[in-house]
Structures are given as C-alpha cells and as structure tokens.
Amino acid sequence: MQETSTQDLQALTFAIMRAQADYARCIDDDRLEEWPAFFLDPCLYMITTASNHRDGMEAGIVFANSRGMLKDRISALREANIYEKQAYRHILGAPCVLGEDEKGVRSETPFMVARIMRDGSTMLFATGRYLDTYRIEDGAALLAERLVVCDSSRIDTLLAIPL
C-alpha cells in the first residue's frame, strides 16, 4: 500500500464522497440511464449478502462486469421487466478510505435504502456497505469495482433498481 499524506487522504475522501452523492442522486432521481457512467469499462458491479461475502462465496444476486452489461440491465428494466413502479432514497454514511494500490483507491461506505412504492408506502429496503475500488481521473472518482454487501440474507425478489 502506498503512503498517503493527510492532505491527499482528504482529497481522495472528498472525491469519493462527491461520487457517492452523485451516484445516489442519479438512482434516487430515476436517471438510471446515467448510472453506467459512474463506472469504468471494464468494471465489476455485484450485489451479494454479508454471509456470502464473509464465507468467500462469489455468487452474486446481481453481477455485471462491463459498462455494457450495466446498460443492458437498465434497458431491460425500462423495456422488458414488469414490476410495480417504485423509487429509492439512499442514506449514505461517510466513506472510509481503506488504502490505495495499483488497482486504485479502496473504500467502504455504509448505506441504507428506503423503497417508496407507487401508493406512497415506504419501507426500509436494504442496508449494507459498498466495498469499492475507485480510480481518480482528473479529480473525479470512477468505479472500477462496486461490491454491494447487503446486511440481510433476505433479499426481496423485486430487486429491480440498482442499489
């Protein structure tokens, strides 16, 4: 791991916080076609459970390893999948920069997502943490990897919108 100065760590943390906020707003505002732009190509996006992650099981509830796969997911969501209209509201904790190496900057960020249904009912939908690897390009943080580790092993089958 490279040594990072306090000033560099603050700049990295700010870039990641900004990327996280923009990512959540994109999803929460239903601008899903813009979502793949938060990732590099190739990339990794996977949703899994805490128990699977802890046990080293690599099976994901959702898996994509390219920006094209992310675009296909949104296209299917908009054009092919049938599900009740819903929206998300993300609440994010502060990211913790875990280190930096040749792959990029690794961070962990806790999250909560509320799901708002068409009738206005709201429920806590998911909690967990993002385990990310970012590359910083021109001051902007882009995701090389996002592993979404959900706290609960009970995942709603209606996991339509990205977390």
Image (tube, rainbow, N blue to C red):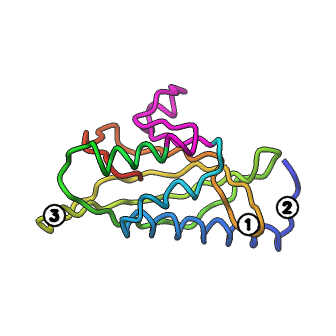
Segment tinted magenta in the rendering: 43-69
Earlier along the polypeptide chain: callout 1 or callout 2? 2
- Distance Cα–Cα, label 2 vs label 3: 47 Å
Q: Secondary structure at mark 3?
A: loop
Earlier along the polypeptide chain: callout 3 or callout 1? 1
Q: Nearer the viewer, residue 7 or 45?
A: 45
Farthest-out residue, front: 79
Question: Dividing the picture into quarters, in which one does residue 96 lie?
Answer: bottom right
- Distance Cα–Cα, label 1 vs label 2: 10 Å
Relative placement, left or right, of 44 versus 78 is: right
Amino acid type at image mark 1: Leu
Relative placement, left or right, of 26 versus 156 is: right
Farthest-out residue, left: 119
Relative placement, left or right, of 131 versus 9 is: left
Asked if marks 1 and 2 touch (Cβ < 8 Å), the reply is yes
Residue 51 is a magenta residue: yes
Q: Residue at x 41, y 59 (%)?
A: 32
Q: Is residue 161 above or below residue 21?
A: above
Q: What residue is disc 2 on?
A: 4
Question: Dividing the picture into quarters, in which one does residue 37 lie?
Answer: bottom right
Q: Residue at x 44, y 51 (%)?
A: 128
- Distance Cα–Cα, label 3 vs label 1: 38 Å
Amino acid type at image mark 2: Thr
Percent of width and height locating residue 161? 35, 52
Dot 1, how many residues are within 10 Å of its Cα: few (below 14), some (14-19), or many (20+)? Answer: many
Q: What residue is disc 3 on?
A: 118
Q: What residue is disc 1 on?
A: 12
Relative placement, left or right, of 146 versus 78 is: right
Q: Residue at x 49, y 61 (%)?
A: 34
